[in-house]
Image: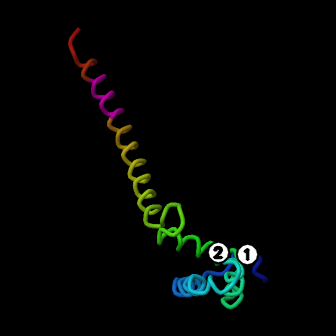
Amino acid sequence: MENTNKKSPKYSPEVRERAVRMVLEHQGERESQWKVIASIAAKFGCSGETLRSWVRKEERNRGLRPGTSTQEQDRLKELERENRELRQVNEILRKASAYFAQAELDRRPK
């Protein structure tokens, strides 16, 4: 049976790093960065758009391009996860507090 999955192949971190490094090293040799990217992408067997996204990510990580670095994105995800967990805990505590307050009121003699 033929695999109809259109997902692109995974590239190892080493391959990504090497391709990005080559783009950054050779970008002054052509009239545009895109031409360098297209040339190097062909050598690595990936699309130009894939390599361009890797290059943009590395440029943000190095502070060469505005945007959120990978490290900042990871920290933001962690803080958002922690925030969700704390909201859940607060909701549980709020409900428990209301339950025990009502139980206390029901227990008092009338």
Going by the numbered disc 2, the residue's amino acid type is Arg
Residue 95 included in the magenta stretch of the image: yes
Q: Nearer the viewer, residue 88 or 20?
A: 20
Which numbered tag is attached to residue 103? none
- Image spot of residue 27 (x, y percent): 62, 82
Q: On the rendered structure, is 45 left or right of 75?
A: right
Over which residues does the magenta segment extend?
94-103
> Which residue is found at the position 47% from the left and 61% from the top?
73
Secondary structure category for the residue under label 2? helix
> Mark 2 packing: few (<14 Cα in 10 Å), some, or many (20+)?
some
The correct choice, above or below, for 87 with respect to 23 in the image is above
- Image spot of residue 14 (x, y percent): 52, 87
Residue mark closest to the camera, 1 vs 2: 2
Q: Quadrant of residue 18?
A: bottom right
Q: Nearer the viewer, residue 51 or 24?
A: 24
Q: Which quarter of the image is occupied by the C terminus?
A: top left
Main structural element of the magenta stretch: helix, strand or loop? helix
> Which residue is found at the position 58% from the left and 71% from the top?
56
Residue beneath label 2, please? 52
Residue 84 included in the magenta stretch of the image: no
The correct choice, above or below, for 101 with respect to 43 in the image is above
> Which residue is found at the position 41% from the left and 60% from the top?
75
